[in-house]
């Protein structure tokens, strides 16, 4: 069968992608609008970015968000990778079904439920809410996404490689760090990146679990957006999109470099 | 490393994430359940009874006998809550259908695209998912507001003569939901369609089956798993959606996520908010279990 776009397929793809990208493109373009009126085009300008630098509350929120995202993404990557190894491993353990259930449920669980239940836990434990409680909440949510990403890589993983290492006398620990880890590293990096962006984005769970002094960027943006559209918000949104775009590029470059290295290693004479 | 160390290393890989999820995912639900059968009071924390372990067993007995189903009775007696649940399920069901109608042609076109283009197309669908949910909804406020772009375009085209109010309506909620969840629908559909063996279609064509019939008799049934996965991935979270209806919808009829949010943050009624969460979970338990079964089977299938 030939693989060419039929006109119907072409149209549905073009329309679908336009639907996905137009709103974001409009938002970015209007962040460079010189006019205060969001709907009137007054020429190109960076004034809203300059205004952001003056907004110390927004900057503080951005800094808090970034720290929470770095901490929770790292913790989530460690825990999520472990969970993925546990779920794909041959070792059977008690409560595996419950474990798998707890890993998959947060992916679709409405955020209001997760947020409320975590807050009530923190209240019951009588801990001060703020930076750490949001970090723990985000770790819990995002580790499940990391698990799914790493697990899908492990599922297609060639077992004979680890078996070969063990036949040659490597301990399971060495096998993991010398064979498995380098091979699944791109998936781990992608999982970290996903956890990082989910943490930066989250409004609902952060609103429930935060306390005084730990206002995150989405909470701040949300309270401004409720009052209406402002060009400064367009600017901060554009910056957030740019941050994620840079991060994604880095991750995909790591993936490419690893793939190239693997290919070279495979082609090298022994 | 000794054999004992290895044993311990393997056990730790299971135990650490397991305990974490028990502590921060499962135990919190038990607490929600417990607070939903408490009374609201103006205090810190704002509910009664509080379990007092210093009283020993009798303290526990006092605690247990003070629990009440009053909140659930309130939930059942006021139609506001019932209407809120119904609206949430309706919005979720309708928007899931719209997502399927929009996502299937896209996923189909992606799966039929030239092989070397497919990774790029997948990336193009995933990318918006990496940008903030809040930002994407905010982008639509820009477009849908009274003097926004949509009205400008429609008026320039002469379709409407006066700016229409798009925001604060159910239409805006549907636009927001379909826009935000489209990648969740397209990706599982694409995964199911892409795996299909094209020789089935060739066989059907050789046997004289017209292409549109082959589509309904071969392609669609084989993609059913993707259809289910995509629909559940959208339906379940949309039922509890808060941000989209809050920013784009009207304040007249609330979805259950908004009602829960208002009871919690506005009225500080923790037991009622907890009871709303418990009932919401019961509404979602069947779709959740089907989704879990699908995920498990996907995993076991990939492992074989």
Image (cartoon, grey):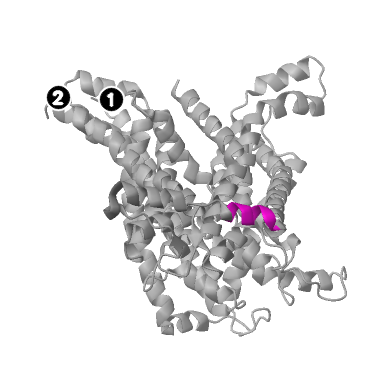
Q: Which residue is mark 1?
A: A162
Q: Residue at x 76, y 23 (%)?
A: B217
Q: Quadrant of residue B304?
A: top left
Local crowd at mark 1 within 10 Å, few (<14), some, or many (≥20)?
Answer: some
Q: Residue at x 28, y 49 (%)?
A: B56
Identify which residue, B111 or A256, lies in the foreground: B111
Local crowd at mark 2 within 10 Å, few (<14), some, or many (≥20)?
Answer: few
Answer yes or no: is residue A251 visible.
no
Location of the C terminus of chain A (image quadrant): top left
Identify which residue, B103 or A253, lies in the foreground: B103
Location of the N terminus of chain A (image quadrant): top right
Q: Position of residue B8 (x, y in %)?
A: 20, 31
Q: Which residue is mark 2?
A: B3
Please give the chain letter of the residue carrying mark 2: B
Badge 1 element = helix
Q: Quadrant of residue A196?
A: bottom left
Badge 2 element = helix
The stretch of residues the image draws in magenta is B71-78
Most distant residue in the top direction: B207
Q: Is residue A83 left or right of residue B84?
A: left
């Amino acid at each position: 069968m030939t693989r060419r776009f039929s006109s119907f397929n072409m149209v549905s793809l073009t329309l679908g992608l336009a639907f996905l990208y137009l709103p974001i493109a409009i938002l970015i373009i209007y962040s460079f609008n010189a006019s205060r009126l969001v709907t009137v085009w007054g020429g190109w300008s960076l004034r809203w970015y300059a205004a952001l630098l003056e907004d110390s509350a927004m900057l503080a929120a951005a800094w808090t968000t970034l720290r929470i995202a770095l901490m929770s993404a790292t913790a989530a990557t460690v825990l999520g990778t472990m969970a993925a190894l546990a779920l794909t491993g041959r070792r059977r353990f008690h409560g595996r079904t419950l474990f798998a259930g707890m890993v998959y449920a947060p992916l679709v669980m409405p955020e209001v439920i997760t947020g409320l239940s975590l807050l009530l836990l923190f209240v019951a434990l009588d801990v001060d809410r703020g930076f750490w409680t949001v970090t723990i909440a985000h770790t819990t949510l995002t580790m499940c996404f990391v698990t799914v990403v790493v697990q899908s890589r492990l599922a297609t993983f060639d077992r004979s490689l680890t078996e070969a290492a063990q036949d040659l006398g490597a301990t399971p620990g060495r096998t993991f760090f010398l064979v498995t880890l380098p091979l699944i590293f791109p998936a781990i990096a992608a999982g970290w990146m996903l956890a990082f962006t989910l943490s930066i984005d989250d409004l609902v769970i952060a609103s429930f679990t935060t306390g005084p002094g730990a206002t995150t960027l989405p909470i701040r943006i949300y309270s401004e957006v409720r009052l209406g559209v402002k060009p400064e918000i367009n600017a901060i949104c554009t910056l957030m999109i740019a941050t994620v775009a840079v991060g994604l590029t880095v991750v995909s470059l790591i993936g490419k470099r690893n793939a190239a290295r693997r290919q070279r290693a495979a082609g090298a004479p022994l | 490393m000794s054999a004992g160390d290895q044993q311990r290393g393997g056990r730790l890989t299971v135990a650490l994430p397991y305990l974490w999820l028990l502590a921060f995912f499962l135990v919190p639900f038990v607490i929600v359940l417990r607070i939903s059968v408490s009374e609201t009071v103006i205090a810190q924390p704002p509910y009664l009874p509080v379990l007092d372990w210093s009283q020993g067993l009798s303290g526990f007995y006092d605690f247990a006998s003070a629990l009440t189903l009053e909140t659930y009775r309130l939930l059942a007696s006021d139609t506001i809550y019932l209407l809120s649940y119904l609206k949430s399920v309706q919005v979720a069901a309708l928007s899931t259908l719209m997502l399927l109608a929009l996502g299937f042609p896209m996923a189909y076109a992606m799966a039929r695209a030239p092989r070397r283009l497919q990774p790029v197309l997948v990336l193009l669908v995933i990318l918006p998912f990496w940008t903030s949910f809040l930002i994407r909804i905010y982008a639509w406020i820009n477009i849908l507001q009274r003097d926004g772009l949509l009205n400008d375009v429609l008026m320039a085209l002469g379709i409407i003569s006066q700016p229409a109010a798009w925001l604060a309506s159910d239409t805006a909620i549907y636009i927001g939901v379909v826009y935000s969840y489209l990648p969740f629908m397209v990706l599982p559909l694409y995964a199911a369609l892409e795996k299909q063996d094209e020789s089935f279609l060739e066989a059907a064509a050789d046997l004289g089956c017209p292409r549109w019939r082959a589509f309904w008799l071969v392609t669609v049934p084989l993609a059913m798993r993707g259809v289910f996965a995509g629909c559940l991935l959208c339906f379940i979270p949309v039922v509890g959606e808060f941000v989209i209806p809050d920013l784009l919808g009207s304040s007249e009829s609330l979805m259950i996520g908004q009602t829960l949010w208002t009871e919690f943050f506005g009225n500080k009624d923790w037991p009622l908010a907890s009871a709303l969460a418990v009932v919401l979970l019961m509404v979602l338990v069947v779709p959740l279990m089907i989704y879990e079964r699908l995920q498990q089977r996907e995993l076991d299938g990939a492992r074989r």
